[in-house]
Amino acid sequence: MARKHPKPIQWLKAIPRRRYLATLAIVFAVLWLALGVAPHDRGTWALENSLAVLLLIFAAAFRRRLLLSRVSYTLIFLFLCFHEIGAHFTYARVPYDDVFRGLFGVGLNDLVGWERNNYDRFVHFLYGLLLAYPVREVFLRVARARGFWGYFLPLDLTMSSSMIFELLEWATAVVFGDGAVDYLGTQGDPWDAHKDMALASLGALLAMSITALLNWHFQRDFTREWVESLRVKNPKPLGEEEAARMMAKRSKRASR
């Protein structure tokens, strides 16, 4: 009789949660300390790490109230690792092309016809690809999003947060002037912000599409849940009519 081997997801589930999270935290701390030594530009490194620190504080603060899955923590961990590499070298100077040339004898940029350092574009794509699922988990467990909304809302938040980040970059450029050139990493492309947002959106769309396909395959009530999520639950109009109803209720309570 053939011996059954545990599936990868079973291996992951078999690891005690505390030990798994502690391992991710230790590995990231070692990477963060190593890449924090002599970065290309200390000011840019500090700016890049400000949002990462906020994300880690948020995750730690809600760890007991909202403990995410091992998959979500792994995806967050991977994104932060790639982000820290960009923070160390600055995104426009990550030497991926030199590493690729050393391994294969030809530069990646030459191979695909790129004329700029595209590490920043790659990480913006990863922002959507790796973080959309953890965001989906929060929406499902906190807001009880179901069906269509369980896939659309993570995509929507990825797109809007990507836009907010680009606005923060613009504000940083206004405040710091030429000192923010390495932080912005536009490399002379006037459409840099638009392309970054598009890639983040594409990554999130791909992540949610894969998630939907997996759920369609394994979830028996997948179609019914989608149909139910798009059904109108409250037939009464809101706006001025809801305001009138609330004022009428308030007047009735005051008259008692």
Image (cartoon, rainbow, N blue to C red):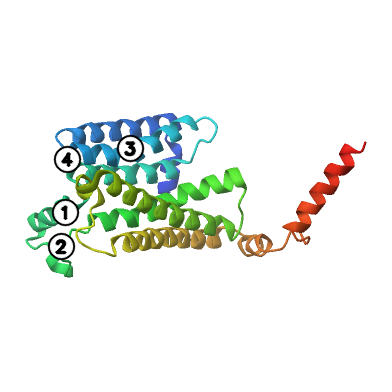
Per the model, the C-alpha gap separating discs 1 and 3 is 24 Å
Name the amino acid type tagged 4: Asp
Would you say 162 lies left or right of 246 here?
A: left
Left or right of 159? Residue 52 is left
Can residue 16 be seen from the camera position used here? no
The residue singled out by tag 3 in the image is 50
Q: Going by the image, does 1 lie left or right of 252? A: left
Q: Quadrant of residue 74?
A: top left
**Residue at mark 4:** 41
The answer to the question of whether label 1 and label 3 lie on touching residues, with beta carbons closer than 8 A, is no
Q: Which residue is mark 2?
A: 108
For label 1, the residue is 96
Q: Residues within 10 Å of mark 4 (few under 14, many from 20)?
A: some
Query: Can you tell which of label 1 and label 3 is closer to the viewer?
Result: 3
Compared to 124, does 39 lie above or below?
Answer: above
The residue depicted at 20 percent of the width and 46 percent of the height is 90
Helix, strand or loop at label 2? It is: helix
Cα–Cα gap, marks 2 and 4: 25 Å
Q: Looking at numbered disc 2 in the image, what kind of residue is underneath it?
A: Leu
